[in-house]
Image (cartoon, rainbow, N blue to C red):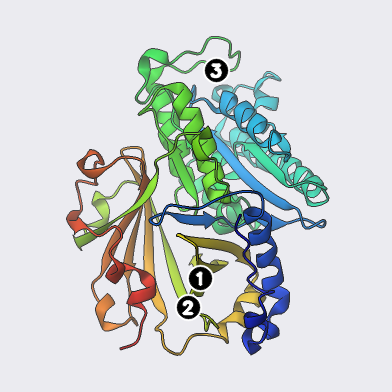
Amino acid sequence: MIYVYYCFDLYYMRSCYWMKHFHLFRRYASHFTLQLTRGYRYIDVHKQIFVMSQEEGKNRNKVYKVVLTGGPCGGKTTGQARLCSFFESMNWKVYRLPETAYIFLSGGVKFTSLSKEDAYRLQRNLIKTMMQIEDTFFDLANTCEQNCLLICDRGLMDGSAYLDPTDWERMKQENGWNSVQLRDNRYNQIIHMVSAANGAEPFYTIDGHNTRHEGLDTARKLDEITAAAWVGHPYYDVIDNSTGFEEKVNRMISTVCSRLGIEVNDRLSSESKKRKFLVKSLAPESMFPGYQDFDVQHYYLSSPSRKTQARIRKRGQNGYWTYTHTMRRQVQDSMVEIRMSISEKDFNILYEQRDAKRHPIYKKRRCFLWNNQYFHLDIYKEPNPERCKGLMLLETYTALKGDNLPLPDFLEIEREVTGLTEYSMYNLSLKE
């Protein structure tokens, strides 16, 4: 069994840095000890353990919010039930938030029979209703005695998929909403279950669904626009139909466990790894599918140990920002990483502890879906160290190996650089 004490190690506590910001790191240490003292063992030297950003309730319990979305007949209902059972077996409290639109659809509302203005008002009220339902569940989770998983049957951004883009912008402006707030800050993880109409057509059916009437073509279109609505969320996973349905559901559960840092061993099969590619030249914007651009800033922090890396990230769009604190440490044969969402105030406190030996890193991150695969294209920007000038790296998480992974055909890929230390951000930031 492995015990990791980030803040309570005597060596660390002697550090002025850790003493000064003890109130911040006490929270992060609790996540490590909670995860790693329950019998999880890390033995793969090539494996990185990513412990996702998790909120902390009033009883210091974990609160994790995941959205299950997707097109018709994607396995969302079955997946929700299986995910619930899996986490309940680990003594988590699980709340299953109902699909708000179903309340209206089962009540006799037909979107196709509404005028454009009526549909606009209904969609606005639907989103407000969804916010209230979610906030009620979030409040319950916050006072729960157990670790708590909230499974949202669709999220706020799904509503944007059924509106004209100009109407969506109008709605956000009228209500004081912004996409970073609705998409990135509200939920920990988004999972899109691809419709059977896209890759598993023989299994597509609407039997048993009183409110579902879509044919294959309509189902594919709904799947595409729903997937596009969530592009840009920092932790977005697309579960396609490249395997059978049972394995598809297992991949979904495994993805949640992976983001949470829960080792499931052989209980679920998951081979998904991050792969990184060097891009030679940037294609014109018109060649990209629907995408979202973000400004990203990384700052490495002074650390009392060479075995520990710490950094903060500021990620934003149109003047709205999310803030993340990341710590990495070698534990036996594995690199363990924990990511925690922090406030702007905490970010500014930690910003004062920047590592003078490392450059800040500035980049534009372009997020897009291509061929049912979610990609990040990091375009490094000025001011950056000389070695980062003109650098572009494409990243994705996939179980596909070698040439089995189709890459965007509109990008000129020079070569794969997965695992090459010279392309790690930690090394790219080092001052010469």
Q: Secondary structure at mark 3?
A: loop
> From mark 1 to mark 2, how far is it between C-alphas?
7 Å
Q: Position of residue 157 (x, y in %)?
A: 56, 44
**Mark 1 or 3, closer to the camera:** 1
Q: Position of residue 162 (x, y in %)?
A: 52, 36
Along the viewing direction, whichever of 122 and 186 lies nearer the viewer: 186
Q: Secondary structure at mark 1?
A: strand
**Mark 3 or 2, closer to the camera:** 2
Q: Secondary structure at mark 2?
A: strand
Along the viewing direction, whichever of 53 and 223 lies nearer the viewer: 53
Query: Relative to 396, is 116 above or below?
Result: above
- Disc 1 residue type (three-letter): Arg
Query: Relative to 12, is 394 above or below?
Result: above
Query: Relative to 358, is 81 above or below?
Result: above
Which residue in the protein does label 2 denote? 299
Q: Position of residue 188 (x, y in %)?
A: 59, 51
* Chain-order first, disc 3 or disc 2: 3
- Disc 2 residue type (three-letter): Tyr
Q: Residue at x 23, y 72 (%)?
A: 390
- Disc 3 residue type (three-letter): Arg
Which residue in the protein does label 3 denote? 212
Quadrant that contains the N terminus: bottom right
Along the viewing direction, whichever of 301 and 383 lies nearer the viewer: 301
Q: Residues within 10 Å of mark 3 (few under 14, many from 20)?
A: some
- Which quarter of the picture shows residue 196? top left
Q: Residue at x 38, y 56 (%)?
A: 46
* Chain-order first, disc 1 or disc 3: 3
